[in-house]
Image: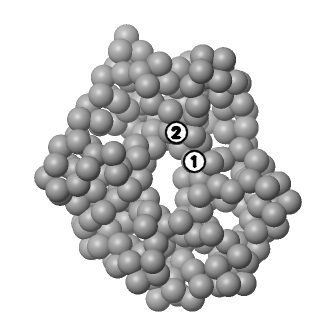
Amino acid sequence: METTIRADGLATVRAEIVRACRDAGRDPTSVTLVAVSKTFDAAAIEPVLAAGQHVFGENRVQEAKAKWPALIARQKQRGHTVELHLVGSLQSNKAKDAVALFDAIHSVDRPGLAETLAKEIAKQGRRPLLFVEINTGDEPQKAGIQPRDADAFIAACRDRYALAIAGLMCIPPVNEAPAPHFALTAKIARRNGLKLLSMGMSADFAVAIAFGATHVRVGTAIFGSRPIIA
């Protein structure tokens, strides 16, 4: 039953992405669906893989290390690839593992982390896509660069740390309309020549697509309510 629910959820989200792209006059292939599988085990992920989804997001490095290598190995045996994105905050002491495991990191948000990532990328020879996280709501409890500091931080990532920043990510405040936050993130991206925008989750990805999102991070709409962790 749960297998069917998750496959149906994936199909619904895909259809909504196509509809949102049509409404925005965009090609649906310009939007990458990142299925956020945080807190879900391999048994919950397998049906989504079987339904043809191969781009997934995780919030924590240790959780991803525990479940994804085996899943990726099985997919390779079946002739399929998996693209794994880190969509949660990254501690500098986990940068080594993050660079080794993930194909994209959406949460570059401070100079110390940028410096550590630069060293690990040079050492490992891997080049994950890098997104700078923008704290569009200036929320003190939330990670991310404040909008007024974004241009200087992006320039430092490029010039001081030689990081190839590919785009920006944002998570709007839960109690505010998301559109202004998506618009601000897109504006910062344009003036810095960045083409990728990681914006939008289960409740607002259609709005994000209207503002140019290239990556939408959708979990609950695919997997259902998250398991309660003690």
Between 3 and 132, the one nearer to me in the picture: 132
Q: How crowded is mark 2: few (under 14 residues within 10 Å), some or many (20 or more)?
A: many
Residue lying at the far left in this picture: please name it.
23
Is residue 50 positioned above or below 176 on the image? Answer: above
Answer yes or no: is residue 110 visible: yes
Cα separation, mark 2 vs mark 1, equals: 6 Å
Q: Position of residue 106 (x, y in %)?
A: 55, 59
- Identified at 55% across, 53% down, the residue is 87
Q: In which quarter of the image is the N terminus?
A: top left
The answer to whether 45 appears left or right of 27 in the picture is: right
Mark 1: secondary structure: strand
The answer to whether 123 appears left or right of 193 in the picture is: right
Q: Position of residue 104 (x, y in %)?
A: 59, 53
Which residue is under mark 1?
85
Which residue is under mark 2?
56
The image quarter in which residue 229 lies: top right
Q: Where is residue 127 in the image (x, y as percent from the top left)?
A: 69, 57
Residue contact between numbered discs 2 and 1, judged by CB atoms under 8 Å: yes
Mark 2: secondary structure: strand
Q: Residues within 10 Å of mark 1 (few under 14, many from 20)?
A: many
Answer yes or no: is residue 175 visible: no
Q: Quadrant of the C terminus?
A: top right
Q: Which amino acid does label 2 sit on?
A: Phe
Between 3 and 74, the one nearer to me in the picture: 74
- Identified at 26% across, 31% down, the residue is 12
- Identified at 59% across, 58% down, the residue is 129
The answer to whether 73 appears left or right of 30 in the picture is: right
Is residue 53 positioned above or below 1 on the image? Answer: below
Between 175 and 120, the one nearer to me in the picture: 120
Q: What residue type is labelled 1?
A: His
Q: Position of residue 98 (x, y in %)?
A: 72, 51
Mark 2 or 1, nearer chain start: 2
